[in-house]
Amino acid sequence: MKQKFLLLLTLLSFFLQPAWARSNAGKVPRVPVVELKGSAYERGLQHGQQLRQPIAEVYQKWKASVRLETNRHPDSVIAHFLSTSNYKAAIQQWTPELWQEIEGMAAGSGQKLDDVFAFQLIDEYWGYLDRLKHGSVDKDHCSAVGVAAHTGQPTYIAQNVDIDTFMHGYQVLLHINQTPTTPEQYILTCAGFIGFVGMNNQGVGVVINALTDLRNRVDGLPVTFVTRGLLSKKSGKEALAFLQTVPHATGQNYILGTETAVHNLEASANQVVPFFPAEDKKLVYHTNHALANHDVKPWMQQYHQRMLTGTGPKTNSQTRFAALEQRLKLAQQPLSPALVKATLRSKDHDKFPVCVTYNKDAAGFTFSSVLFTFGKKPSVQVTHGSPDQSEYQEHFFTAKK
């Protein structure tokens, strides 16, 4: 009976995948690795060409989601969103190669450049909706962890990447080959998107959490361009300086991993503030509410105060933060990658679990779980979907540091 149930579950999972994924599906779902080489434009072109079909599919689903959220034609929404912001100037100042990359992606995929550009602005689009609706946008997603090198163990950072359900089945691991000016990188992303989180072979890695209570700015550097900008750096010191210097478009928490340390920084439009839940700064964890940065949107002041004082019913973000704290900071066992994985698989609360299994009727789910390990043999581990349903797949760097 159990074997029949597992077979039925496998078949159901197969047919719920998009067509492009089904055509390459095996017994165990794996995140496809897309090799990117050459200049920034060439990398974008290869991304667009190799994933032309899935990009067309996921962009169509994205626009359907925009229509559902706004009750307006998605092209009209996208045009207004882009016309009321000036992210391009910051991108061209701080990460000009990434603008070339999305130009290449548009050419390779056959999609309009405005659509490709707007799709990169996931967090900024949430900020756009929030400005229109003043606080009614619920985007409590992602649980992230970092552990600095200790007692013979290397630094590692990890995260459940929780995102909109329409991205189900479009997981991709970009592998950017090293060039004289670009480090080798692994980047967990969705087809048609330049990257959620990642790690390079120079001892720099980053995981993130949206902080929708913090102030935004429409002329700052968008989140994915900050993330990819960090991964282009050749040292932890250089990456940290970049993170503390760029103008941030959107409230976001960044856990920056290096060979010897983890840095946890809550960034907003007007400031970047460190936050460490443990005094020795060896352990960090975060969810989706600001704890040290008080550069809060006017209409989120009351919410922010409730988060800090713990008054009122616990939110999704507070509940997951407490679960991370209980399992990691208060754990009766040594910190280890195995403990972090068990934490990211956990469902300690029925309504607000750390691990969110895919449900086609839900708004969001755990798109992938990642574990980035530094040290002598650095590696990147990713799951296809939530880690309770998928094993971590490990990838190693090919170029020397």
Image (cartoon, helix red, strand yellow):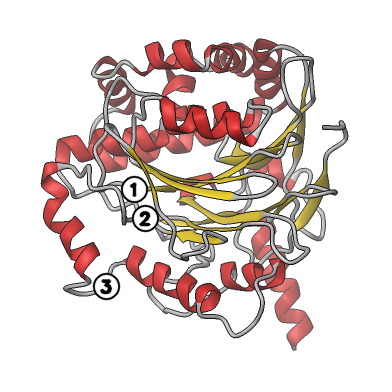
Q: Is residue 132 left or right of residue 115?
A: left
Label 3 amino acid? Lys
- Name the disc covering residue 19, or none: none
The residue beneath circle 1 is 211
Kindly report the distance in space between the C-alpha atoms of the residues bearing marks 2 and 3.
Answer: 13 Å
SS at mark 2? loop
The residue beneath circle 3 is 314
Q: Residues within 10 Å of mark 1 (few under 14, many from 20)?
A: many
Quarter in which the N terminus is drawn: bottom right
Contact flag, marks 3 and 1 (Cβ < 8 Å): no
| In the image, residue 4 above or below residue 126 | below
- Earlier residue among tags 2 and 3: 2
Q: Is residue 288 left or right of residue 138?
A: right
The residue beneath circle 2 is 288
Contact flag, marks 2 and 1 (Cβ < 8 Å): yes
Q: What percent of the width, then of the height, locates residue 222?
A: 41, 28
Quarter in which the C terminus is drawn: top right
**Residue at the extreme front:** 280
Q: Residues within 10 Å of mark 3 (few under 14, many from 20)?
A: some
Q: Is residue 82 left or right of residue 165?
A: left
Residue shown at 72% from the left, 20% from the top = 182
Kindly report the distance in space between the C-alpha atoms of the residues bearing marks 3 and 1.
Answer: 16 Å
Residue shown at 28% from the left, 42% from the top = 69
